[in-house]
């Protein structure tokens, strides 16, 4: 079955950097679009960045110029490099993908990794 496992979260001071990883299995990784989302306490889960199977990328306005999403198809892994972190980046970060069973779309999520930005 589809598995997504995030890692790399932690606590960092404002202005610092972290790199999140999402290790994937159970589907044809090289053909899949993968996205990173985040959910802060009391708020909805929102899209942070996404990467297509061809390497095209899309970012939320709040992270443009600071975050970079990339993929390594040989390792079935997607990364989120986060620089110039701000306290408002504090959230649980999730990676996600979707698969199709016939005409039914199935969304898959990892367990999440906590990112805390605080002085």
Image: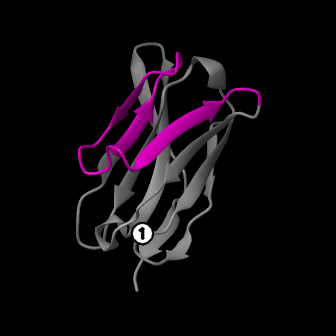
Q: Say whether residue 28 is visible.
A: no
Percent across and percent down for residue 22 are 61, 46
Image-based side of 3 in relation to 86, left or right: right
- Rendered residue at 62%/61% (across/down): 8
Color style of the picture? one colour
Percent across and percent down for residue 4 are 61, 45
**Picture quadrant of residue 32:** top right
Image-based side of 29 in relation to 11, left or right: right
* Quadrant of the snapshot with the N terminus: top right
Percent across and percent down for residue 30 are 64, 20
Which residue has dot 1 on it?
A: 15
Residue 64 drawn in magenta: yes
Percent across and percent down for residue 59 are 33, 38
- Residue 13 vertical placement versus 81 (above, below): below
Magenta residues (range): 48-74
* Quadrant of the snapshot with the C terminus: bottom left
In this view, which residue lies farthest toward the right?
74
């Amino acid at each position: 079955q589809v598995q997504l496992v995030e890692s790399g979260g932690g606590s960092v001071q404002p202005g610092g950097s972290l790199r999140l990883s999402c290790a994937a299995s159970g589907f044809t990784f090289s053909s899949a679009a993968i996205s990173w989302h985040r959910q802060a306490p009391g708020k909805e889960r929102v899209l942070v960045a996404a990467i297509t199977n061809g390497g095209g990328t899309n970012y939320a306005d709040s992270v443009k110029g600071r975050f970079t999403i990339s993929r390594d198809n040989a390792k079935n892994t997607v990364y989120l490099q986060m620089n110039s972190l701000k306290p408002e980046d504090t959230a649980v970060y999730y990676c996600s993908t979707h698969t199709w069973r016939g005409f039914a779309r199935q969304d898959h999520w990892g367990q999440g990794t906590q990112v805390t930005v605080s002085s």
